Image (cartoon, grey):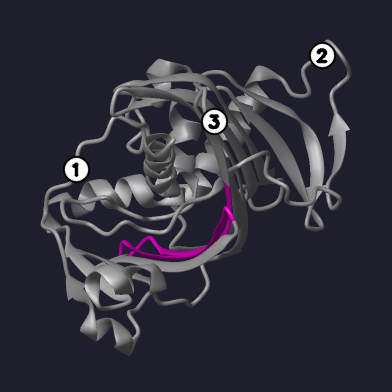
Amino acid sequence: MQRTKALLLVVVLLATPVLAGCTDQGDGGPATAEPTDGTAADASTDDATTTPADEGESAFSDAEEREIRQSALTALRDVSTVQLEGVLNQSVSTAAASQSTSATFGVTIDAEQRRLVVDQTVQTQGRTVNQTTYLLNDSLYIRSSALERRYGSQWVTQNVSERYDRLWRNRSALSLHSNLLNVTENLSVTGTETVRGEEVYVLSLRPSDAELSELGGVNFAGGEVHAFDATFYVSTETDLVVRSDIHVNETVTIRGQELQQVVDVRRDFVAYDQDVAVTLPPEADGAVPIGGNRSVATTTRQVTV
């Protein structure tokens, strides 16, 4: 049972970037906060009203769907900064045990400077862990009280200059959503809704395994994806993504043991192109350097923010 619990924890740790953050498991890296849980995202949907298509009919023509997709893609690519709030739920199970974790998170992304910061609060098995992660200046900075016992500091840092491009590509929600819009052939616009008082198109995306493998934040080595479903809510006025829901159901293998993992994440894109700056607080000056430029190879697939 102890080994099973350890395996579950490994998956939970690796799943933190899965949809909600920028945690990294580099060589010598910290055992960062357990991520998000895996039940269906429980964010309220009572602010959304739906206008579905008639049964058996498409809500929009193929040409209209192509135009809506392209407009959303262009709008995302033109974004300079974005702030998100979200909920991530994860469940991991084996034949002998299971574990659920839930997290709320906030993300600020500066696309022009290629910087981001993730604040998350994780709850699992009666524990609550707060963690802040920065990606900037060729480095990864992580602050968490869970680090103090091991490193003598709540702040640690790792130089990631040799893989900064990949980390940025994999950890940015703008990149993930742009790439999904770009590669997913099975995309349909199913109707319109009102989300947070704004009229939106509802885009349903069902990428194939081959299309998912094109995404920067996805690695299929050792994993079998049973379902990957995404729903984007795109403003009819600005063409920007207002909200997204992503569901992943997969089997992964960790240290020779097979586990079932289900992840649901909801992101609300609450502010675009505001005058925000991603900068380190003074306390980060005392961050303990750890690890190196290499990252540990893992067999789990990671889907990033």
Horizontal relation, residue 194 to residue 32: left or right: right
Q: Amino acid at mark 1?
A: Val
Q: Is residue 91 visible?
A: no
**Callout 1 crowding tier (Cα within 10 Å): few <14, some 14–19, many ≥20:** few
The percent coordinates of residue 267 (x first, y second) are 60, 51
Q: Are marks 1 and 3 in contact (CB under 8 Å)?
A: no
The percent coordinates of residue 268 (x first, y second) are 63, 55
Reading the chain from its start, which is encountered first: label 1 or label 2? 2
Callout 2 secondary element: loop
Determine the residue positioned at 29% across, 75% down: 155
Quarter of the picture holding the N terminus: top left
Q: Residue 270 lies in what quarter of the image?
A: bottom right
Q: Residue furthest top?
A: 56
**Callout 3 crowding tier (Cα within 10 Å): few <14, some 14–19, many ≥20:** many
Q: Which residues are magenta?
A: 101-125
Q: Nearer the viewer, mark 1 or mark 3?
A: 1
Q: Residue 229 lies in what quarter of the image?
A: top right
Task: Please give the residue where the numbered disc 1 appears in the rendered image.
Answer: 296
